[in-house]
Image (spheres, grey):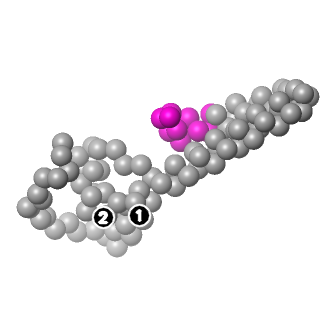
Amino acid sequence: MSEKRQKKIAYPVRFAESDYKTVQEKAKDCGLPLAEFIRRCSLGRQTRSKIDSQIINELRKLGGLQKHLFTEGGGSHGDEYAAVLRAITAAIQRIGGNER
């Protein structure tokens, strides 16, 4: 669907103060205006936290460093390196870093 459609209908929504703060924080984490975040959530569209993306990127860097250290070390402590690399990969997949 085109996001260029004119949005003509406004509908006020009431929140408990704590819920409002939570929704604001989540919208901010996704880099979206509050109305767009609420719209996407209510329509079942994907929202992606920028924080999750930052964590995934950091885990990928750590995995790359782990692999580099393994190859430079001649494979010594191979089982330990492999276990850490598997843990990093599993963490990325749990967060949802399957796109790439």
The residue closer to the viewer here, 90 or 59, is: 59
**Element type at marker 1?**
helix
- Residue 36: quarter of image: bottom left
- What's the mark number on residue 73? none
**Residue span colored magenta:** 90-100
Residue under the image location 90 percent in, 27 percent down? 74
What is the C-alpha distance between the residues marked 1 and 2? 8 Å
Mark 2, other Cα within 10 Å: few <14 / some 14–19 / many ≥20: some
In the image: residue 40, left or right of residue 8? right
- What's the mark number on residue 28? 1
The residue most toward the bottom is 17
Residue 22 visible in the shown view: no
Residue under the image location 37 percent in, 66 percent down? 24
Find disc 2 in the rendering and name its residue. Answer: 34
Magenta segment includes 97: yes
Q: Is residue 3 above or below residue 89?
A: below
Q: Is residue 78 above or below residue 57?
A: above
Instruction: Give amino acid for label 1.
Output: Lys
The residue closer to the viewer here, 79 or 11, is: 79
- Tag 2 or tag 1, which sits nearer the N-term? 1
Magenta segment includes 51: no
Residue under the image location 20 percent in, 51 percent down? 3
Instruction: Give amino acid for label 2.
Output: Leu
Q: Quadrant of the N terminus?
A: top left
In the image: residue 95, left or right of residue 2? right
- Residue 33: quarter of image: bottom left
Mark 1, other Cα within 10 Å: few <14 / some 14–19 / many ≥20: some
**Element type at marker 2?**
helix
In the image: residue 39, left or right of residue 70? left
Q: Position of residue 49 (x, y in %)?
A: 45, 52
Instruction: Tally the numbered discs.
Output: 2
